[in-house]
Every structure is written in C-alpha cells, then in structure tokens.
Amino acid sequence: MIRDIRSAADLAPAYDLVVVGAGPAGLSAAIEASTHGLAVLLADENEAPGGQIYRSVERASDADLARMGPDYAAGRMLIGRFRRADLSYARRATVWNVGPADEETGDGAHALEVGISLGGIARPIAAHRVILATGALERPLPFPGWTMPGVMAAGAAQILMKSSGLVPSGRTILAGTGPLLYLLASQLLRAGVSVTAVVDTTPVGNWRLALPHLLSFATSPYALKGLRLLFEVHRRTRVIRGVTALEAVGSGKFGALRVHRGIKSMHIEGDLLLLHQGIAPNLNLTLAAGCDYGWDERLAAFRPAVDGRGASSVAGVSIAGDAAGIVGAVASAHQGELAGLTAARDLNRLDQGAYERRRNQLAQKLARALKGRTFIENRFRPGKSFRVPGDDGTIVCRCEEITAGKLREVAALGVPGPNQMKAFTRCGMGPCQGRLCGLTAVELLAQCRGVAPGEVGYYRLRPPIKPVTLYELAALPHTEAAIVAVAGFVERAADGAQDAKHGSQQ
Amino acid sequence: MFRRLSDGKARSVSFTFDGVPTMAREGDSVAAALLAAGHCSTRRTAVSGAARGPYCLMGVCFECLVKIDGRPNRQACMTTVVEGMRVETQDGAAMPGQEE
C-alpha cells in the first residue's frame, strides 16, 4: 500500500529515488523502482494520480468511461497497481528545484537535492536518483483575441469533463490541429455538446512529409482509432479546412471566430473557443535542473537530451515520458518503467543479467508503442504562420502582455537570444515563467534573425520553477555561515542553541 | 457557459465569489466551480487591466489567479473548493501585503 504524505513534516529527509509527476511515466517508474526495494517518493502537483491523460479516472462513472474512451479507462489498472505499491506519495506537492546536494547542508551521502513545497511548507529532500516525468504542455496558438475570456485550451475542456463532469453549454468552436483536437471534438459530441465547427489549421503540405511514413502508421493501432475519430467528427459537425489565419472577436468575452481562407473570410459565432495545436515537452524543471536540451525540428519544440534509458546530461537525473519528447501514454509508461528499472540497477538492487533481459523486453514494447508516431507528427505538424503570429498586435506573452510587434522591434536591435529579449521587454518574466510564450518568442526571434531556433536557445530557467512564498524559503534550514552572510550575526539562546537555526526547523 | 453532465452524484459545497454565495460540487477546483457558475472572467491584468479567465486548467498559464480567503495570486485551477471559501476577482497586481 502506498503511504500518503499529507504534510511536509511526514516527508523523510532522504529517499533512494524521487519521481516527479504522477502520469503514466511517473507512476510506472515509481512502481518499478519500488518492486526492487528502493525507497521511493513520488511527488505530484495534482489532487489525485493519473497526470493529464488519466485525470480523475479513479472517480469516473461508467458513463464517464464510455464517453472518454478505452485509452482513458486503461489508466485505472495502472493507478490500481500504484495504490498497491510500497512507496510514498505526496499529492498536491510542488517540486520547485532539482539540483546537486548543497555541500554544507547536504548529508554527504546523497548526490541530489529536491526542493518540495507541500501545504505551505518547503523542504529540501535528499535523493540518490531523480526521475522527471513532468509530461507535456499544450503548444500556444497565438492570434488576435486569443487572450479574451471564453477562449480556452482544448485540454482545459477535457480536464473539466474528466474532473468535474462539466461540458460546454453553448455553441462551441474548436480550432487548430492535431489528434487531440479531433479526440476532444468526438468526446464533446458524444456528451451532447453543440460543436458548431472544427476549424482545422493543419497545413495542406503536411501530407507530402507524412506520406513516406504511411505504411508504418497504417499497421499501427493508431490507424483504426484515428480513422474512426475523423469519420465520427466529420459526420456530426462542420470541419473547415484551408485556413490561413484566425481572429477571435467579442466585447469583453469571446463572441465569434473570424476564419481567413486566403482572400476569403468567414465569421462563425460562438460562446466558447477551444484551441489546440499539439503538445510540447514541459521543460521548466528539466532545464532548471541543468539538463542539456536541443531543438527538434519535426516536433517544432525543444526537448531535453536523453540516452536510450532516459538518462539526462545531469548525473543521477533521468527524464521519462512526454517530458523528454512526445511519445504518448503507452510509450511513456514503458519509458518510466525503464527509468525505474535503471535506477534500481544503478543502486545495485538487481544484477546486470536480469537488468539487461528486462531492458530488452521493454525496448521491444517501446518500439511497438512508438509505431505510427512519425506519421502523426508530420501529418499534424502545426504551420509556421500559426506558431509565429504574423499580426503585430497579437499578444505573445500573456502574463506581461507583450505583442509580436514589440518582440520584432526588439529583435531588430540585434538581441542574440530570448534572455536578452526578456530583459528588454519582460516577455517570459511573468508568473507562468515562459510556459505560454517560450516557443513562440524563440521561433519569432529565430525567424527575425534568419537562424534555426536551436541556435537561439530557450529561456534560462532557474528555480524556483513555481512560485514559492518568501516565508517558505526563509524557513528552509540554513547553515550558520549562510545566516551570518545575510544577517551578519547568529542569535544564540542562553543555552548556546542557535535561535535562528532552531526556528527554521519548526 | 458550462453545464454538468447529469451522472454526477457528488455532494454540493457552498463558497462565495466576490461576496455572492455560489454552489460547487465536492472535488471541483475553484476554477471549475467558477466556470460552472458562469464566470469566464476571473481577474484583470496588471498591465492593461484586461479581463482574463481560466485558460489551461492544469496549473501552467497562471491566467486563473484569484484571491482566496484574502490571499492573492492563488491558482484557481490547482485549489480545491472547500465549504465557506471566500474567492475574489484579482484586480491587477495584487500585492502580498494585501493579505488579511
């Protein structure tokens, strides 16, 4: 049975392995490592295990499961195995730092330190190994009006359906590209939602790139599922293609979508607009941990560099699942299992022969699960004009309200990368820490400079990767030297105990 | 803007939004509860004062920042509604000093 960690005080000072994220990769990694006897802590931000894909699946009714489909229901088995595993689980916990152990405050035995905040109290946790399974983010789809209330990410509608049984009550428009757009359309239609239109922005030229991979796709489990989805959505709602630009209009809230198709345009009235153009690895924790990364042109996104077992460039830190490159739920679980197994091997909990046998089995399963993905990636690769807004008035950075025009102005000054652009404009400096503008800002700058995004690089991300209160940081244990460096003195009580240090450990 | 699928059996929870008594379903996030009650606009931005509302619902975009029980800058999508919770629209850059 898992041990539920309800407050920071229940956390052990150290674990063999800390896994971040309770989606398919994180759950599988934690289960696997725990079966080999590792002391495992799985920390996750959400209310319940499952990640985005299996969100709230434990609470789902039969009707919910029927509506969301078998790929969702499959999460129940994995979560069931997790519940029976011998490990510690901290839900509603924010991991805001992963790095080498502090030379002074560390215990000397564990190489890594993980900053966790739980119930308003922050704690540094020591670990031998860390597996980051932080999943993916929806790629931004910036165009004029995309920030107004009534415009939401497609994933948000799925989350509302899964966790609260909520579906849009008015006229709903879906816009963008990718398999999830059609999956959501079919789920909404099955729930009786009035889907006015699916506005498909997939570039027509994608077929040329995707065709060479058609055979592999056609013989994968994705093919039948995909065709069924497309057929169902086309039969039940209007699908608009050949889209060249989008614009959301309304007074105070979303009222209509203007769809441009070359020189023609159409006006579709609606109450809710849901956007999606694929997902990209969630980089914030992996980059803040110092992992090397690079640009993946087919994915049109950055992803961390990992070897065949998921090991990153930082010793002891592995990355599994969509966080290392978009692979889907089934492959994510295999990658997680492999990372968990490798952690057990690294800490001498199983012999090399047994490790290699399992590793080879997992490699075969992984290859099967990845079949067909190259076709999907090419077929639904979002078009450049939807990744980099041509309209100068479009907001790129939602937090600081920085427009594409402002960024072009600054790019023209010759800024070498997004960090300088951030310093000039505040683009990426808001509370989301670049999660919603990063890809757009980088590609826009690369376009202005006429270089590849990989050459421009991503934001320099630093911990804490999520807001932590000063109170929490101040209450972390500090060495006497650190206190003296800041305060100039250490208060000592009459019995010689350090007041400051004592206070910090409460 | 959103409606409940009828198959939910969860108990209801009451909270206030800008002082107005509002019902949620047990287990709802604050953001889900606000959307269910018809509020798609839940803050005004610090820069231009533009209206914004929940966008990603997975803790990434920080668009759903609200004041909860007097504390500003709370992510409505990452907070579960509890009985008697006091939720308010966040107007511009709410400063931590405004905590009550």
Image: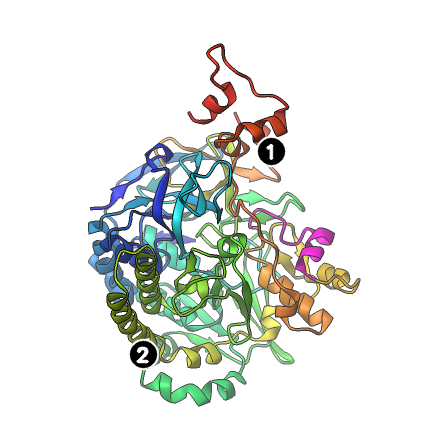
Name the residue carrying label 1.
Answer: B95
Residue A98 percent coordinates (x, y): 47, 48
Side (left or right) of A503 relative to A31? right
Instruction: Tally the marks.
Output: 2
Q: Which residues are magenta?
A: A417-432
Name the residue carrying label 2.
Answer: A228
Q: CA distance from mark 2 to mark 1?
A: 51 Å
Side (left or right) of A461 relative to A286? right
Q: Is residue A428 magenta?
A: yes
Indicate which label's residue lies in the foreground, 2 or 1: 1
Q: Nearer the viewer, residue A449 or A53?
A: A449
Is any part of residue B37 visible from this angle?
Answer: no
Please identify the quarter of the rendering in which residue A250 is found: bottom right
Q: Is residue A138 magenta?
A: no
Q: Nearer the viewer, residue B13 or A326?
A: A326
Side (left or right) of A113 relative to A9? right
Colour option used: rainbow
Q: Residue at x 41, y 64 (%)?
A: A310
- Residue A497: which numbered mark, if any? none
Q: Nearer the viewer, residue A349 or A80?
A: A349
How many neighbours does mark 2 have within 10 angstroms: few (below 14), some (14-19), or many (20 or more)? few
* SS at badge 1: loop
* SS at badge 2: helix
Q: Chain of mark 1?
A: B
Q: Is residue A243 above or below residue A439?
A: below
Side (left or right) of B89 relative to A156? right
Is any part of residue A148 visible from this angle?
Answer: yes
Q: Residue at x 60, y 33 (%)?
A: B95
Q: Chain of mark 2?
A: A
Residue A102 percent coordinates (x, y): 50, 41
Please identify the quarter of the rendering in which residue A470 is found: top right
